[in-house]
Image (cartoon, rainbow, N blue to C red):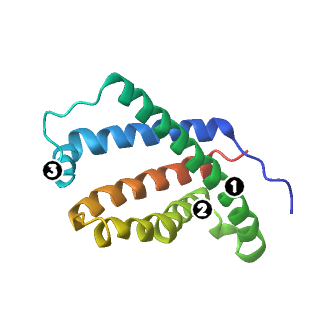
């Protein structure tokens, strides 16, 4: 197999898009229902120190997600070239597959523990996992359309 080539600019772009999606998702779109399901007071504000720590971890997490998905996508693309008709190997199909199957196989099952063991609601699971699905699909699409 060829050496895997990674487009770090695409990973950076996917990080920015993921952060924007998260800001919108947990802010104006679903912030209030999410906070309610998390049993957080409406007026709760993190300290500046906590905000820096959380943003740093979010940046590291979104980088790792993009980096790993770029590696996985490169392998899937290589396998697709050897097993599928060329007309079916499009950036759209590869990006959607990368995002949806990663979510379906890793994010969604892992999230069931929040309901089963942590006692959180199915509504919270829906808010969190749908955000993960949207960010993984957007990351997969960015990486597949912006291949090295």
- Residue 44 position in % (x across, y down): 18, 34
Quick one: quadrant of the N terminus? bottom right
Name the one closer to the observer, 115 or 134: 115
Q: Position of residue 132 (x, y in %)?
A: 41, 55
**Towards the viewer: 54 or 10:** 54
| Side (left or right) of 97 relative to 28 | right
Residue for badge 1: 71
Mark number displayed over residue 94 = 2
Of callouts 3 and 2, which one flags the residue occurring earlier in the amino acid sequence?
3
State which mark lies toward you, 3 or 1.
Answer: 3
Q: Relative to 147, is 125 on the left or the right?
A: left
Which quadrant would residue 118 be assigned to in this image? Answer: bottom left
Where 130 falls versus 110 (above or below)? above
Query: Residue 109: horizontal and vertical position, in percent?
Result: 43, 71
* Whole-number angstrom distance, CA of label 2 to CA of label 1: 13 Å
Residue reaching furthest to the top? 48
């Amino acid at each position: 197999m060829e050496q895997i080539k990674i487009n770090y600019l695409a990973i950076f772009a996917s990080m920015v898009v993921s952060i924007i999606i998260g800001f919108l998702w947990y802010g104006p779109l679903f912030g209030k229902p999410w906070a309610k399901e998390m049993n957080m007071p409406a007026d709760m504000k993190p300290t500046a120190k906590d905000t820096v720590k959380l943003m740093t971890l979010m940046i590291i997490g979104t980088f790792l997600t993009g980096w790993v998905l770029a590696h996985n996508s490169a392998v899937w693309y290589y396998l697709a070239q050897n097993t599928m008709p060329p007309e079916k190997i499009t950036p759209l199909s590869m990006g959607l597959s990368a995002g949806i199957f990663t979510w379906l196989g890793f994010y969604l099952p892992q999230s069931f523990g929040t309901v089963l063991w942590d006692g959180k609601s199915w509504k919270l699971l829906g808010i969190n996992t749908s955000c993960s699905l949207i960010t993984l699909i957007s990351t997969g699409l960015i990486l597949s359309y912006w291949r090295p």
